[in-house]
Image (tube, rainbow, N blue to C red):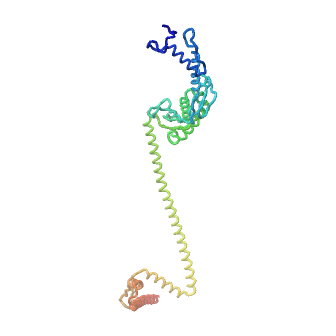
Amino acid sequence: MGLNDPQWGSKNNGGPPDLEELLRKLNAKFSAMLGGRKPSGSGSNGAPANLGGGAGLIAVILLLIWLASGFYIVDASQRGVVLRFGKQVETTEPGPRWHFPYPIEAVEVVNLSQVRTVEVGYRDNVKNKMLQESLMLTEDENIIDIQFAVQYFLSDPGDYLFNNRNPDENVRQAAETAIREVVGKNKMDFVLYEGREQVAAAATKLIQEILDRYKSGIVVSKLTMQNAQPPEQVQAAFDDAVKAGQDKERQKNEGQSYANDVVPRARGTAARLIQEAEGYKQSVIANAEGDASRFKQVLVEYEKAPAVTRERMYIDMMQQVMGNISKVMVDQKGSNSMLYLPLDKLIEASRSSTDAPSVAPAAAASTQSSDTDSTQRARNSLLSRDRETR
């Protein structure tokens, strides 16, 4: 029984289905889907007559799949660079896009908002140093060890793709070149301490100039100094030098503080003494002028009445002398007894009677009267003795 036997059906005596019949039925279905007519027979080699129609359908399906492979989506932070046979033809904006599929066109999607980081002088950790990158020479011929990181993002996807073979390495080399130039123009203390921010800013500007000159499509956003110190081989000596410098500054500050405390006080004391001397001078001059004026006035009065003026001057002098003593001994004329006047007691009694409340007005008046009489008698006795002497 042959393959073209009319008795060969879907099954042959319980055997497997006929392959030729299956192909014929499949071809008929494809032809019906494409609007063709049913097959009327087979070819000379036993193949289906419309087998070419099925191959066309497969070709169409493959074509559709090939065309569908050209669809792509660009996110808001991305840009698409379309390449036609390797040449850039356009840059697509965010959204669903289509391009001719491979091998005619291809697309490179570039993220513009992603911040990329490049490490110079270390890798992943500052302890994992790259000495060939980190050791640099300063203006004063000292060697320092610097590790820093450069952050950048993309500005032009076309320049980024076609002008950079290895973007991270380009940024690393540009950063190393820029920082070496900036460090070489400054002294060691400036780079290590007070000038770290200025060094980072100058290096950032120089890196950007280098990358722009190469048209790399890269924008440097920040340069962060991770570590800046002398090499480990001289770290101990450098620490000693720094400590000595700090001790020097501390002692200078202490001396300046002491000077700021002593000098103003000395100047204040000198100014006070000068003012006191000036006041004493003015006081002496004023007293002398007052005494001279008073003497002139007394002289005028003395010339008018010498006896009265002399007696008045004597009384004033004795009053001034007697006012400063507390006890007076009077030698009465023609008698061997001495008169003792307790002036201090009399003055105290007079003050107490003046300050105390008047409990007994009559007694206080009599006491004051007796004190006054005693004082008057003493004064009269002195006057009479003076007259007799003269």
The picture places residue 231, in percent across and down from the top left corner, at: 46, 34
Q: Residue at x 37, y 86 (%)?
A: 340
Q: Quadrant of residue 346?
A: bottom left
Task: In the rendered view, tell whether residue 362 sits above or below residue 84.
Answer: below
Q: Residue at x 44, y 39 (%)?
A: 239
Counting the numbered discs, the total is 0
Viewer-proximal residue among 133 and 85: 85
Which residue ends up furthest to the right in the rendered image?
89
Q: Quadrant of residue 175?
A: top right
Q: Quadrant of residue 27?
A: top right
The picture places residue 58, in percent across and down from the top left corner, at: 56, 20
Task: In the rendered view, tell whether residue 257 sits above or below residue 200.
Answer: below
Viewer-proximal residue among 128 and 264: 128
The picture places residue 283, in percent across and down from the top left corner, at: 53, 71
Viewer-proximal residue among 292 and 79: 79
The picture places residue 123, in percent across and down from the top left corner, at: 47, 32
Visible residue check, residue 93: yes
Which residue ends up furthest to the top in the rendered image?
1
Which residue ends up furthest to the front in the rendered image?
7
